[in-house]
Amino acid sequence: MSARDLVERCWDGVTLRQDCAGPPAAAVLEDLVQAYGEPHRHYHTLDHIGALLDRRGRGAADPDVLRLAILFHDVPDVPEATNQLGRSAFKGLLRRATVNSGSDRP
């Protein structure tokens, strides 16, 4: 299974279980795939995320939290940006991810 397939399968499962599947969730998945495909990335790529998802520890107290942490942990990888800019980009992606999830916070 390709890294993209692993990421999509994971994302689809999480969004279905958390009752937030649909077009907004699909758009966030595409944002994630695009972010991990940026040309400046050499290690923090979609292959890295796929490998982590494939090897993640079983028996986590909340497997979806672990999956989301893996999916989002390397999104703010902007070499020329300050930490604040990177955090802002990450918060924007999280806000988009939660816009239709019933959460009022990113």
Image (spheres, rainbow, N blue to C red):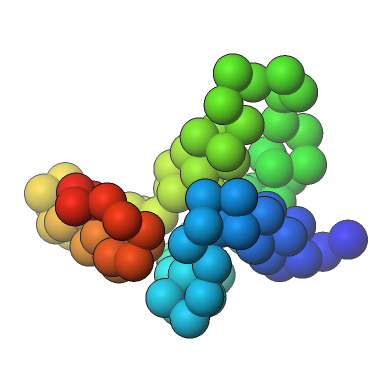
Residue 81 seen from this side: yes
Q: Tell me the quarter of the picture where residue 58 sits.
A: top right
28 displayed left or right of 93: right
Tell me what residue is drawn at x 57 percent, y 26 percent. Answer: 62
Quick one: 6 or 43, which is closer to the camera?
A: 6
Residue 89 seen from this side: no
Tell me what residue is drawn at x 54 percent, y 67 percent. Answer: 21
Q: Is residue 77 above or below residue 5?
A: above
Q: Residue furthest right?
A: 1
Q: Is residue 96 above or below residue 7?
A: below
Count of picture labels: 0
Locate the N terminus and report the quarter of the image it occupies: bottom right
Q: Tell me the quarter of the picture where residue 47 sits.
A: bottom right
Image position, residue 94 (x, y; %): 31, 56
Quick one: 83 or 9, which is closer to the camera?
A: 9
Image position, residue 103 (x, y; %): 27, 51
Quick one: 35 or 99, which is closer to the camera?
A: 99
Image position, residue 79 (x, y; %): 29, 57
Tell me what residue is drawn at x 40 percent, y 55 percent. Answer: 75
Image position, residue 102 (x, y; %): 31, 56
Q: Is residue 28 above or below residue 41?
A: below
Quick one: 27 or 89, which is closer to the camera?
A: 27
68 displayed left or right of 76: right
